[in-house]
Amino acid sequence: MRGWLIVIASLLAAVSAQPYAGSWNDGSRLAAAESLVDRGTWVIDDSIFVKPHRATISPYADPDSHGTLDRVRINGRYFSDKTPVPNLGLAAIYASLRALLGLRAAESPSRFCYLLTLFSSGAAYVIAVACCHRLTIHAALPKLRRLVVVASFAVGTVALAYTQSVNQHIWMLAVCSLLFVLLDDPGFPAIARWVGIGTCAGMGYCIDFGIGAVLVAITLVWAAYHARAVRPIVFVVVGMLPWLALHHWLNGRTGGTWLPLNMDPANFVWPGSPFTPENLTGSLPHRSPGKSVLYALDLLVGKRGFLMHNLPLWLAVIGFVPLLRKRTSDASVLMFAASLSVGSWLLYSLMSVGSSGVCLSVRWFVPLLAPGYYVLIALLREVPEAWPDFVVLALGGFILGVPMWQGGPWRTHMVPGYWIIVAGTLLGWLAWRLCLSGSRRSKT
């Protein structure tokens, strides 16, 4: 079954990957990869993703695009505003494809975009799906239930849509999924497990400085609590430190600062820049406490809310406290999952505006599918009678997943039929719970 799942996930990734950049976001990362390999520099001034007319055909979905504006200007030169370590990884993929296939971005922008998307975001998706399946096996769910849970994760959430382009969010999902496999299964060799946990946290820090910072902090706290000894913590730090050092060293090389380049408003002062100190993520916006609360709630349950686009996660939220009361052996990992999810949500609620820009749902939270499904799987193991609830929500997720996938991650409009599907699913779930409650009362 595992082999077939990987094959199917790979096929879905291959069909989903697009032969163009769909937004400034992926255009910025692709510009960095192209510049590093073809010109040996982090400077992206001459990239086809900054100056599309240099390519044989436009590398963007919109042939009239004037290039990515997700860039910073430092000492008169432009750089990608994205975290540098993943861009270095993309460059390694491009260098390999150039050596093996003779691929050149400016001559074959469509092949360049498609292959880099497939071997980065597509590969991350396959890893995440495989990890979800591993968690269902370790939870000893029946085979049919394992299949439904993995299918729900794979095509009934926003995950599949984010395989269509180069983006850090699906990569972060893969890293978080690997981390939960290591946290959940103490059967791995002890040293390898602790170093692996630290490595995943360090990689996450390099990919997404926001969620990554929360991840590093929670990992250290969890390791200290769970191990109650110095040696395992040392191994976690050993796995973590090289990634943190590489991230900050590359930031210093390009921008002269240890902070991410896109957190400095001065780097966005250039003609035509769409970014100002008021709309940059990473600083406290000027808004009232009431508006801050409404914004935080909107990130979860608004028209772009993460819970509304990933319907099975409602069961994880509702069932978390009853699950924790069962005092299961994996209670510390469940708390890890909750801390990562709540901490990331609060961080972005406090230090962002615009709900992550033009995208499907809230792109920052795509990695939170990993802790969400970890809780779901544990709940279905400990409370088998919750299975009908999951099926109702998963069915709604499958229905919503089709138009989400069709529209892709960089969409300007709501998912077609969004409110009808979401309201129908949640009302159907409520009706099921009321019927079940009434049936139980009648029996007593």
Image: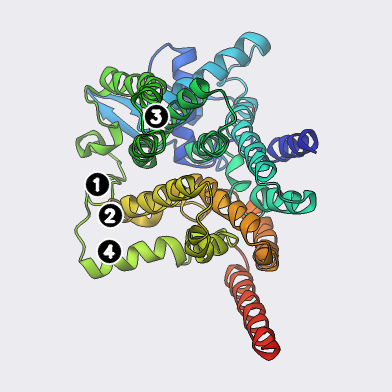
User: How far is disc 4 from disc 2 in space, using C-alphas?
Assistant: 7 Å
User: How far is disc 1 from disc 4 in space, using C-alphas?
Assistant: 19 Å
Give the label, 1 or 4, closer to the camera: 4
Q: Quadrant of residue 217?
A: top left
Mark 3 vs 1, N-terminal side? 3
Give the label, 3 or 1, closer to the camera: 3
Picture disc at residue 206: 3
Q: Secondary structure at mark 1?
A: loop
Is 168 situated left or right of 249 in this image?
Answer: right
User: How far is disc 3 from disc 1 in space, using C-alphas?
Assistant: 24 Å
Q: Residue furthest top?
A: 99
Mark 1 vs 4, N-terminal side? 1
Q: Nearer the viewer, residue 225 or 390?
A: 225
Picture disc at residue 350: 2
Is the C-beta separation of discs 4 and 2 under 8 Å? yes
Q: Position of residue 435 (x, y in %)?
A: 67, 84
Picture disc at residue 292: 4
Residue at label 1?
276
